[in-house]
Amino acid sequence: MDIPLPNKTINSSICKYYPIDNNCKNLYNSLIGNCLWFSDPAGFNDPYDLNIRIEIPNYRKNEIGELAKKMANSSVGPKRSFDQIMAHYGDNLEALRDGFQKGADNITKRVGVCCFSAREDLLLMWSHYGSGHRGVCLKFDISGEQKTFLVPVEMEYQEQYPIFDYLHLSNTDYGLLQFLVGTKSKDWEYEREVRIVKETVRGKVPFDKKCLTEVIFGYKADPELVSNLKKLVVSTGYTCSFFIMKLKKGVFGLEKEPL
């Protein structure tokens, strides 16, 4: 199922990989408390994550007028008229860039982000985030619970340093938010990342238990851990299905089998 967003859609199934450490604290807390952790992006491992210095095109004077109209009609940000925007920025591109940068800095300071992947069968994700294929992947259907799983942002991976061209963005509501949260270097493309973003919310956020549809174990998962975790999930009130990953034969890749 696809979830409609402004001018695009996103698949409603998203996956979260968990490592198995000494006490499985994060995984167990998420399952027992049916909650997800929304983090301060300052702690992410990509130094450019929500830390992209805003660069804008060299707009011509008539384009700045069009941009001012778009800003005046936007449903987000400070409410200013066309005349107020033009009086403030005029044709001063540096002031315009600084205005967008200030907006970006304000977003970075207040958002909480929870990271997922669009795929459950990614070799590198299991290696890097799933304890070398010994961990677990939780699969969620986010279509039934808008409160917890809004706003979803599908990552865009770019080879060149990005330019924020607000004038030509079709997505007027999520423009700067989408750009900051959803732009990474192509080096990270293997993650196939989807993010849920909340403004002014960090820490634990509960989710409806029916949203958890699958628990998938890595192909190296310890049988005792598999058994114990299945019992925990069932006793906690989830009605999800259980799978374990297997190596495909004759081709590189993973495929899941029911447990």
Image (cartoon, rainbow, N blue to C red):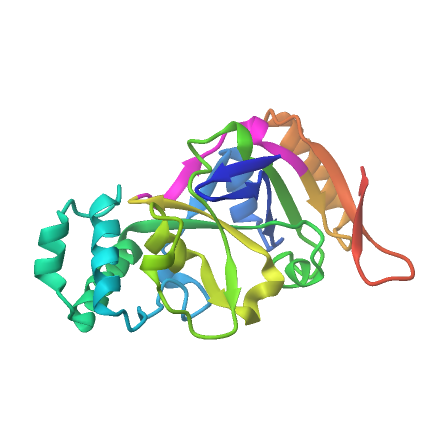
Residue 204 is a magenta residue = yes
- Residue 236: % across, % down: 59, 27
Report the span colored magenta: 201-214
- Residue 26: % across, % down: 52, 47
Front residue of 120 and 166: 166
Residue sitting at x 73%, y 36%: 242
Placement of 183 over or under 196, stated as above or below: below
Picture quarter with the N terminus: top right
Placement of 58 over or under 73, stated as above or below: below
- Residue 83: % across, % down: 10, 52
Horizontally, is 149 left or right of 121 in the view? left
Residue sitting at x 58%, y 64%: 189
Horizontally, is 249 left or right of 254 in the view? right
Q: Check the image and name the residue furthest to the front.
A: 62
Front residue of 9 and 13: 9
Picture quarter with the C terminus: top right
